Image: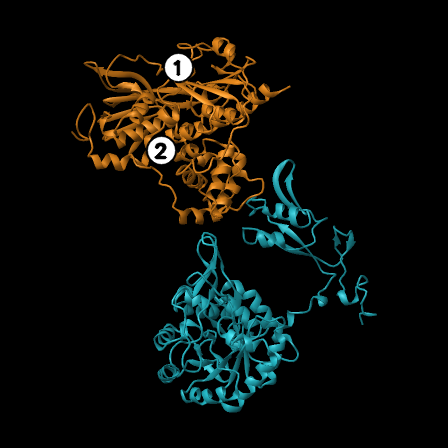
Amino acid sequence: MDIHTPGIAAGRLAVADYAQNFSDAHPPLNRTQALIEAERCYYCYDAPCTTACPTGIDIPTFIQRIAQDNTRGAAQTILEANPLGGMCARVCPTEMLCEQGCVRHSNESKPVEIGLLQRYATDAFFAKPDAQPLFTRAPATGKKVAVVGAGPAGLAAAHGLARRGHEVVLLEARPKLGGLNEYGLASYKTTDDFAQREVQWLLSIGGITAKTGMQLGRDITLNQLTAEYDAVFLGLGLGGVNALGVAEPQCEGLRSAVDFIAELRQAPSPAKVPVGRRVLVIGGGMTAVDAAVQSRKLGAREVTIAYRRGLEAMSASPYEQDWAQKNGVSLRTWAAPRQILAEGGRVTGVEFAVTREQDGQLVETGERFEIEADLVLKAIGQSFIAKPVPEIALKNGRIATDEAGRSSHPKVWAGGDCRFGGRDLTVEAVEHGKQAALSIDAFLTKG
Amino acid sequence: MADISSNFLGIKSPNPFWLASAPPTDKEVNVVRAFEAGWGGVVWKTLGEDPPVVNVSGPRYSTLMSQDRRVIGLNNIELITDRPLRTNLEEIARVKRAWPDRAMIVSLMVPCTEQSWKAILPMVEDTGADGIELNFGCPHGMSERGMGSAVGQVPEYIQMVTAWCKQYSRLPVIVKLTPNITDVRQPARAAKAGGADAVSLINTINSIMGVDLDRMVMHPSTDGWGSHGGYCGPAVKPIAQNMVAEIARDPQTAGLPISGIGGVTTWRDAAEYIALGCGTVQVCTAAMVYGFKIVQDLCNGLSNYMDEKGYATIDAMRGLAVPTVKNWNQLNLNYVEKALINQDSCIQCGRCHIVCEDTSHQAIFATKDGQRHFEVNEAECVGCNLCVSICPVPDTITMRRVMPGEIDARTGLPVSAEYANWTTHPNNPMRAASSA
């Protein structure tokens, strides 16, 4: 069994290769590196990096605290603004957020490594998070809030509400808490079970009762929740996978990239996860990159990402595109899937139409080509399944809310990917949860 | 190419860079390595009377560092040489014979009795050394025994010992001054009165480097106790340069040769000391941080600078900046500058704004038309130079002179072309009757 074995198979690599491939993709800074990097921060006034951070972390302050060897104070600054600052340090596309804003860009084209510094501070804290609690709960208010979905939005909301003395019940459909942090991220972005360690810390504030295996619409209804609780927060995520728009035959080797990523995250060892010899990922986002790179790391010999437009239109950032290419993934642009090719119940490849842009419209040139593959991963985006929340008004298929996240229902707030108007970033989901907690708190404690 | 050789009190060296009397000049092996690397001269580590002193066998040095671990300041509690006098004298003689073109100065520190000085001086002369430097500066250890800075803090002692040295030795006498005093002109005048051929300064500054907060013990410490040490390195350069300039411009000591010491790390530092009147500079910390090879960079940089500016010799540039050092009351109060921000190179960090707003004159706007934009408000700017001093991008904020006749937006009045200082200012109750 090796990288040349045809078809879909597990165990293509040696044990040591798996360990190497799935270790931390971006190793943390050591203390010396962190102190030197921290010194690069100019401590800007009204800092552009902070403005660029969806959670508004006071970045110059936390970096100054690192420079002063006060990692606990640095972590406090981060987690106060973003209780999931540990995970965000690992997964934020910093190159298009804080680091894009860094003024160091202007004269040396090299921003301060804000993401790595945030990781340095939060890692130091999470090495012994219980030494002294950073946050304590306010006196109990007697109010009860249901938080549905334990992803980044739900966790941030639950933490914020519990901090303010409300009693939170956290309902999650899956067996584990964490949402995309647990099921949706490339393994090399969050090693050492960090997602669960972070969840444990968030819950340690107290006042949060987590119930897994509870799916809205199946195990409980929104009506029941609004009746039983003083307020409800919906952090439902995106449960549906977009269709390719071509016939998708029932055949082995055609699956959703989201499921593939989740399977890998939950597998006891990457050696147990089967992967194709030739893998084709259809899509242009972060999920496509995560699925493609991890396919390579699992031992796929050839991996291609096919995207129907050009590189600049991909929602995966240039940094992510580079990362894919560094890991041996080919990027094939201007390719729209036209037919899934299968033989004997197994996928054999995909036929594509060559596309181009004409007067702002994507059109096919008439030319076609095929890419052979024994595993085709669909990563063309996910959609919100609104069925469990028929009472709630939608906008463009997602939940419509006001600025603070309040939906059309006066007792229901929503945040994260299920809420209309975001960029589907983890850090935005956290901000939604944080702001909703403030808004719910104001609602519950007024008069 | 510029001639960077030095002739100080008749002591010739191929360049003006001498290693200061300090750990790097304690032994033949070190000094030979220094000469091989290119140092123009050394001041041999201070000799004392036998039996030799004993040093601690624990931390003798400690540094103040920037975050990227560059040494800003160095503190030491090492005493004078802890080797027998004879050993040192033999080595000095041997090295001087082998390196006749290099300056060999011997630093001395013996008790404040005429007999002690009378005894040691001929022995030093016999080595063939070029001169002596009287260590009236070390602030740690030896000062408790009535030597080092304990002498340097009493001008009468300085004059007395200097006179003995001039009486009992034919060698040029350089008096090394301590900065641990209030007015450096007093010891310099005393040295001159005693017949000193030159002064060298500064010796190290009394200091403790910090506190070990885990153990609640001062740092550095020996077996749990510490003692103040002498501080040197880049951090002390501004203090040293002031003292050098004070002596250079004091009518009573003007013209007295000076060997400048204190934080010389680059050729630029050295050139500054020379511009303030020094004939040679002495270096220790830079060598202790980088090794002896650094002297080649000092020589090369100084030579290139002199070529660029057209100074053929050290003497051609020596002291040129001294006449610009004045008492505050001589500064022209009619002269006006305003800060100017170069919008093309401004990276918009906003630090100029916040420091001006918080701590100075509220003279830098943070926005323009609702956009982030940093611009000087000339109606408030007093030209204090704080923004220039903290801007992280070189040459982005500069000071612009408001020319005579131009309106100063802060006062609304035209700038006067006339020189006028505090001594004649109407607000000065002690003002002179007229500026004439």
- The location of residue A240, given as percent across then percent down, is 38, 15
Q: Residues within 10 Å of mark 1 (few under 14, many from 20)?
A: some
Which residue is located at x 58 percent, y 82 percent?
B157
> Mark 2 highlights which residue?
A189
Residue type pointed to by label 1:
Met
Q: Residues within 10 Å of mark 2 (few under 14, many from 20)?
A: many
Which residue is located at x 79 percent, y 54 percent?
B413
Q: Chain of mark 2?
A: A
Q: Quarter of the image containing the C terminus of chain B? A: bottom right
Res. A359 in view? no
Q: Chain of mark 1?
A: A
Tell me: B117 left or right of B411: left
Residue lying at the far right in this picture: please name it. B433
Which residue is located at x 62 percent, y 46 percent?
B353
Chain A, which colour? orange
- Front residue of B330 and B96: B96
- Front residue of B66 and B316: B66
- The location of residue B89, given as percent across then percent down, is 39, 84
Query: In the structure shown, which secondary structural element does the residue marked by tag 2 occupy?
Result: helix
Q: Earlier in the sequence, mark 2 or mark 1?
A: 2
Chain B, which colour? cyan
> Mark 1 highlights which residue?
A214
Disc 2 to disc 1, C-alpha distance: 28 Å
Tell me: A84 left or right of B181: left
Question: Mark 2, mark 1: which one is toward the viewer?
Answer: 1
Query: In the structure shown, which secondary structural element does the residue marked by tag 1 occupy?
Result: loop
| A433 w.r.t. A322: above or below | above
